[in-house]
Amino acid sequence: MNVPTAGQKRLVIVGATGMVGGYALRYALENSAVRTVTSIGRRKVGISHTKLTEVVHKDFTDCFALAETLLGQDAAVFCLGAYTGAVSDAELRTITVGYTVEFARVLHGSSPGAAFSFLSGGGADSTERSRIPFARYKGEAENALLAAGFPRVYLFRPAYIYPVEPRREPNFSYRLLRGVYPLFRLLFPNQVIRADDLARSMVDVPVCGTAKHQGPVFENRDIRALAESLHPTS
């Protein structure tokens, strides 16, 4: 997506060492609409680029130290998270809700006009009453972001995210889904999304906006349609 140089945006990406965040970072660095990229995470991404500034931040329960770094940002892509079953229920809520809310609080204080793009998940429950912790916590985080005061918040709710590049899968169900992905995609196209397509959409929307989609929530089918419209050859 090409835009005039004068319209270039300053983008911050949180969680760029993860699968989706990694694709978002690489895409943003190549994107002519992005002027600078600030990567914030608990470890370095291992990429060198003239656009890129890296900030290692270990404790996302307290983001006060990031206030200066976050000054003057135009948009944020937040991909920090954890897989269900990989951590305790209490830690899952801390990562999913606590980290998101604390980062958003500091970002809004430093850059109140920034757009916020959030990696949520399919089934996120905005009523916060689901019996499934992941759905309940993602819904809680979404509600907090919508109430945080940002002018634009985009909530991405992917279903199964296909890794594209080989990786060590976090559990058996992911190994199974990866193995049957071609058939699964054929039978249930709106229940899958490529990780790179998701990442590109999460960058394009807060950086360039979208005139076709109304409302802050992007369900899996919306993400697929957006990715196809912006990158039809992907």
Image (spheres, grey):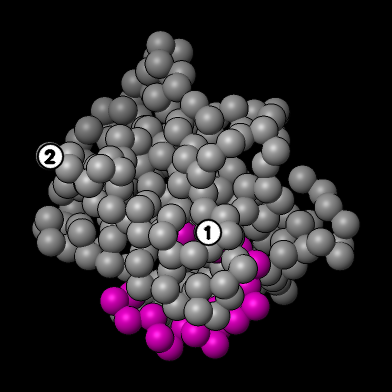
Write down the residue under mark 2.
131
Does residue 74 belong to the magenta stretch? yes
Q: Which residues are magenta?
A: 60-79
Label 2 sits on a secondary structure element that is loop
* Above/below status of 219 relative to 46: above
Residue most toward the top? 187
The quadrant holding residue 226 is: top right
CB contact under 8 Å: marks 1 and 2:
no
Q: Amino acid at mark 1?
A: Phe
Residue shown at 77% from the left, 45% from the top: 1
Return the residue nearer the eye: 163 or 79. Answer: 79
The location of residue 51, given as percent across then percent down, is 70, 71
- Residue at disc 1, secondary structure: strand
Instruction: Identify the residue under disc 1.
Output: 116
**Location of the C terminus (image quadrant):** top right
Near mark 1 (Cα within 10 A), the count class, few <14, some 14-19 or many ≥20, is many
Q: Residue at x 46, y 19 (%)?
A: 189
Q: Is residue 202 left or right of residue 121?
A: right
- Name the foreground residue: 159 vs 150: 150
Q: Percent from the top left, x then y, of residue 104? A: 43, 69
Q: Is residue 9 left or right of residue 192?
A: right
Question: Residue 107, image x and y in percent?
Answer: 50, 74
- Can residue 23 be seen here? no
